[in-house]
Image (tube, rainbow, N blue to C red):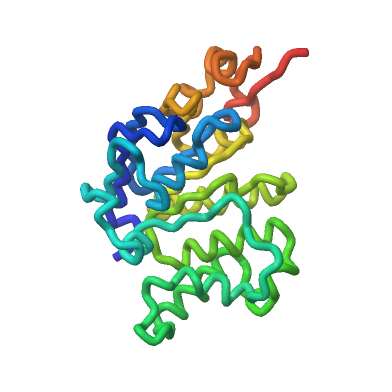
Amino acid sequence: MSVGERCALLELQNVSYHGILHDVNLAWSHGQFVGLIGPNGAGKSTLLRILAGIWRPTTGSVYLNGKALSDMSARRRAKEIAYLPQHMPEDVAFTVEQYVEMGRYAYRTPWGHLEPESKEAVTNALNTLNLLDYRNAHLQRLSGGERQRAGIARCIAQGSPIILLDEPISSLDLYYQVDILRRLQRLSHQGYLIVTAIHNLELAARYCTRLVLLHHGRIYAHSSPNDVLTERALLDVFQVSAKTYADPYDGFLRVSYPS
């Protein structure tokens, strides 16, 4: 069964967390590319950790395909949800292939071995991210963009229809920012549900199908990029008086910051 044929419905109902998140209600299905935006401290990383099942909400519930995420084992969650933290390891001795293989832990045999199906999944993931030539390279020798691609490859190898990423393009130059977002966009077109925290508002508007704007741990807006990134929202949430307009070349939203 392909990723697109699996109903990867992720839903939050009245989720709050220790004064960081307040009464969050969201629901997404496969094929969507969702961007979490908002100022630092708005709750983006916390929300991703709750979606991944790493942290449990203090109130409310998270549901995956109608089942409570809290009732699932870590192995079961790993078969449905892949999570890439904000900071990738830099000083580990693993090769790229070894690191991507870690994404298959939920499918290892009782003796810790990888079946042929898992080895094929790793090779396909490396190929998808153009990393086959780096499979024997040590992770610590890669550039920031290459490490991020390795992290995404690990998520793909995991075989989960939902991929959560915490600022995957932070600290990358423009080439790698666009490269990573294009790759994530293609994955969403293949049926994956992609949810990522992102700071660059114009890139979020260009590549994401939906945006969630968080403000003091609450949802200020959740809709299409053009409906979320309004001039009023930029003023209310970011305290920036800016103008928004459609790019005359591609029609995507742009933000102008007057002096």
How many marks on residues? 0
| Residue at x 46%, y 32% (from the top left corner) | 20
Please state which of residues 34 and 15 is positioned toward the viewer in this rendering: 15
- Can you see residue 192? no
- Left or right? Give the position of 201 relative to 185: right
Task: Give how far across and how far down residue 33 sits, in percent.
Answer: 45, 43
Residue 104: which quarter of the image?
bottom left
- Determine whether 151 is above or below 185 in the image: below
Q: In the rendering, at what x and y percent does residue 222 appear?
A: 41, 28
**Percent from the top left, x then y, of residue 181?**
58, 47
Q: Quadrant of residue 231?
A: top right
Residue at the right extreme?
259
Between residue 10 and residue 109, name the one nearer to us: 109
The quadrant of the image that shows the C terminus is top right
Q: As drawn, is 158 to the left or to the right of 137?
A: left
Is 76 situated above or below 181?
A: below
Residue occupying image coordinates x 46% and y 50%: 164
Expressed as whole percent of the image width and height from the top left, the position of residue 238 reads 60, 20
In the rendered image, is residue 160 in sight?
yes
**Residue located 67% across and 75% down the image:** 93
Q: Residue furthest left?
A: 66
Q: Which corner quadrant holds the N terminus?
A: bottom left
Name the one closer to the observer, 251 or 176: 176
Residue at 64 percent of width and 47 percent of height: 169
